[in-house]
Image: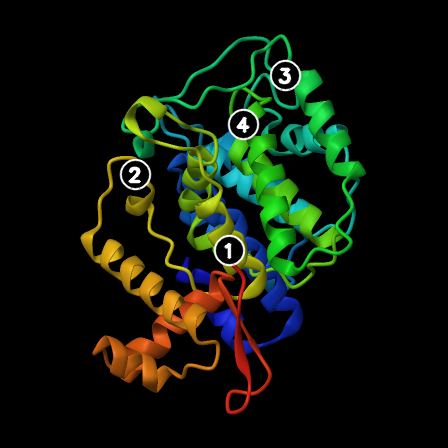
Amino acid sequence: MGDFEEYLRQGEPNKAEKAKVWKTAIGLQQVDGLKPSDYLIATAKQNIEGDISIEEVKIRIDSYYEQHPIKEAGNRTEEADKVSARIAEILGEQTFTFSPIEYLTIHRRLFQGIYSHAGSIRDYNISKPEWVLNGETVLYAGALNSKATLEYDFEQEKQFNYRGLNLQGIIEHIAHFISNLWQIHIFGEGNTRTTAIFLIKYLRKLGFKEVNNDLFAEHSWYFRNALVRANFEDLSKGVHKTDEYLIRFLSNLLLGTHYSLKNREMHILFHDTVKTKIDTVNDTVFNLIKQNSKITAAEISERLNISLSTAKRRIKELKEKGRIVRVGSDKTGHWKVCD
């Protein structure tokens, strides 16, 4: 992914924008463990430099694999190269329609000639063992009702009114919508990459034009695992489905927060004593603020026998999670509890 950093550092708007798009396009291949070729990287750089158009990139990639067909079973480099180029093309377009047809069309454009079912609704039931679920699978929509479910989810989202929601509320709603959309798994393969591109385009439509797509480039596997955890539960083992991880991802994406995005923390068997200890301290700090809305970080530090920097860090985390809000200035204001 460092192949395009030179263009981002140079600061030339057109080149930097193209570099961001390519970085996202290539990074998204990681959701299926795919890695594009050096030839694709070199060709992408020519596009960033303005030497060739995105259409010429696609033609060159197609021609390359006609001349150098891959014969190794399981080698999906050709898929990674072609889909990366197609993602770059779609993200470079200023067009979008919020509809099931748009969703299906994105899949067709990404995987035409790669999957025989590109753009088609699957007509068979599926299951997929997941690492993050310790080998279990999400229960996806049945083939017989997947189309109706897709149309229902789109209609519900069309009718939803975002008026009156703060940014956190908006993010939570988008997380819920996109996790439901992904859970349908309307396609046999390529659902996550299609959903990610659709989400980026939809966020632009909603006005989030400066989306930090580096998150998709650098944490695409986290994005997929977050979707998995949002749609899996096993109450017999105390595992509940949760949008928490997807909300963290979207908060970093849209608000510039700095939530830690670690795949291992999403594993259903993960236990982190350090994380538990931090959560306990945060809860204690929260209770002190709840008791005294004008308490200072210095007073919290003294009460809990922790360093001032630790107290400030715990307060910052509570703010980022939306549990507390500062009203007024740091000197004369007070804390408002949101829980």
Q: List x then y, in percent, for residue 22.
A: 55, 54
**Residue drawn at x 57%, y 87% as measured from the top left:** 329
Q: Which residue is mark 3?
A: 146
Q: Which residue is mark 2?
A: 267
Of callouts 2 and 3, which one flags the residue occurring earlier in the amino acid sequence? 3
Q: Which residue is mark 4?
A: 183
On the image, which quarter does residue 113 sit in? Answer: top right
User: What's the CA distance linking mark 4 and mark 3?
Assistant: 10 Å
Helix or strand or loop: what does disc 2 sit on?
Answer: loop
Helix or strand or loop: what does disc 4 sit on?
Answer: helix
User: From what the image shows, is residue 309 above or below residue 25?
Assistant: below
Q: Are marks 2 and 4 in contact (CB under 8 Å)?
A: no
- Residue type pointed to by label 1: Lys
User: What's the CA distance linking mark 2 and mark 3?
Assistant: 27 Å
**Image quarter of the N terminus:** bottom left
- Residue type pointed to by label 2: His
Q: List x then y, in percent, for residue 296.
A: 40, 84
**Residue drawn at x 41%, y 31% as measured from the top left:** 76
